[in-house]
Amino acid sequence: MFKKVAPYIGEYKKYTIWAVLMMSVGIIANIAPYFFMYQIISPLTRGEHIDASYILLRVVAIAICEIIFSVTYVQGLEFSHISAYNTLKNLRISLQGKLEKQPLGNITELGSGRIKKVFTDDIDQVELLLAHAIPEGIANIAIPAIIIVLMFVFNWRLGLLSLVPLVVGMFAMGMMMKSGMEKMNAYYESAANMNNTIIEYVNGMEVVKVFNKDGDSYKRFGEVVRSYRDFTLDWYKVCWPWMAVYSSVLPCLVLLMLPFGSLMVLSGTITLDKMVLVFCMSFAVGPSVLKALNFAGKFPQLDYKITELEKMMEHPPLKEGTSGFKGNNMDVEFRDVHFSYKDAEVLHGVDLALKQGTTTALVGESGSGKSTLAKLLVHYYDLDSGSITIGGQDITDMSLESLNDQVAFVSQEQFLFNTSLYENILIGKPGATKEEVLDAAARAQCNEFLERFPQGIETQAGDGGKQLSGGERQRISLARAILKNAPIIVLDEATAFMDPENEEKMNAALDEIVKEKTVLVIAHRLSTIKNADKICVMKEGNCIAADTHDKLIDSCDEYRNLWEASVSASTWKVREA
Ligand SMILES: Nc1ncnc2c1ncn2[C@@H]1O[C@H](COP(=O)(O)OP(=O)(O)O)[C@@H](O)[C@H]1O
Ligand SMILES: [Mg+2]
């Protein structure tokens, strides 16, 4: 586990070392007072006379030791925190670097909740290790170890007696950890399950309410909460007895020393002052050992967290090239594209050529693989096999940046940053002038709703664009793509949420924009792509036909069915209105 964290400590290692050194000084200052106490008590037990100044000197020395202990302890903690928080910073930056290299598709699948958890909660666990467990753990193991050695030096019999409760306590602790470990994975799983269900419950509240699913949903919620309780209690149930043993035995090292020590004093094997000294010292051992063991109990949790964290980032990174765009033109070619999400293959060898300056439409039933094909062109994922080229250059050969310069993608899922709508559009072309941004917004039919907002285009989009309706988000995304003015445009049901009137205007604007460009469009209304240069009919992950509308109507049953369904759907809509 230390090995896992070590690479991220980097230049801050010296702070950890300083922290340990500081705390070691603290340890010595913590033990020294026992000697001064002994020096006071020893002559007293023998009935010898001592001066007030003799006592005062030692009391002052004890006070100084306590001050040194406090100062070094605080200073040690400061150093350990400097090291810890810088390590956390390095860890987060390194994870961010790994995340950036992950296929974009995988990141979306992980979900923002889970990623947030890794970046904040899970990584924060490392703080415990570096800021507390290492320096304090070392101190809390070193103090009792030194004391016990000293006890042996003073009187080996008493030293031995003090070890008995220590061994019993540690055995109980070990037993607790061993039996707890077996339950722990189940416990963590149930905790994760509860978190997921709660997030789902909250996110799905709208659906739950609208469909009157309160009952079902609440039942599931109740189930996971109850199962979490059961797992937790189960875990504690096996731990409690052992916990009771070690927490009562450990602080009481005098348990055996008291009767046997008294006998030894009576029989003259040890002087009273030595026994008192050993007693005093033994009281410092228990709490330290308890503290150290408590840290030890946290290590398995930490191990689990770090393993989870690494597991999440262990997807092979995206095959990203380093060269710029070197294609001869803007022709796009999918060749024998096979692709699977996890295990199930969803594209089974798709061949499709998009000629520069033409529009190609993908049609097919829901789930036939249209969106997947579109996402592959923008390199959200790597292919299983086959290739995608632009102007003859494989997209895995170019950097994501240069690929993104060539392709504008308006996906089905619209994401807006929580900044102004203006800035959201500006992302399409960071250097654009205000006129260009406003022009793009107008072309994407945004003005109609922008005028309704008191702050117009300066309105904040809200978290993920929540302030806007689906259709409005879509139009902002389109404005972004229009502003970008890339030579290849991919539109995945980009107008699906718009009303027919806006869609018509939008399509007119698009017609103008897509001139001379290579366009791949997935339309939910087939009427809008009737005039496409090529229509590719997707079925169950295959492109079963690719031709013009007129030819396909005659030759492809699948297409004719889709067309008829689409036409009847739109007339049905008209009649309904
Ligand atoms: N992120 C994903 N993880 C696993 N399977 C997915 C994912 N996205 C889509 N699929 C599956 O891949 C298939 C094709 O989906 P998709 O490309 O979205 O279809 P379309 O856009 O034609 O409706 C479907 O069977 C769908 O269930
Ligand atoms: Mg789709």
Image: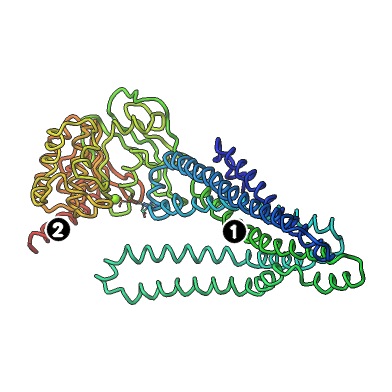
Q: Where does residue 416 sit, x and y in percent of width and height?
A: 25, 47
Among the two numbered marks 1 and 2 on one chain, the one whose residue lies closer to the N terminus: 1
Determine the secondary structure under disc 1.
Answer: helix
- Measured as percent of width and height from the top left, residue 231 is found at 54, 71
> In the image, 419: left or right of 174?
left
Q: Quadrant of residue 249?
A: bottom right
- Residue 134 seen in the figure: no
**Residue at label 1?**
298
Q: Is residue 283 left or right of residue 237?
A: right
x 51%, y 50%: residue: 309
**Disc number for residue 568:** 2
SS at mark 2 in the image: helix
- Disc 2 marks a residue whose amino acid type is Ser
The amino acid pointed to by label 1 is Lys
Q: Label 1, label 2: how many angstroms apart (C-alpha)?
A: 64 Å
Give coordinates of residue 390: x percent, y percent.
Answer: 33, 30
Q: Position of residue 430 (x, y in %)?
A: 24, 33
Q: Residues within 10 Å of mark 1 (few under 14, many from 20)?
A: some
The correct choice, above or below, for 309 with respect to 238 in the image is above
Q: Is residue 284 visible?
A: yes
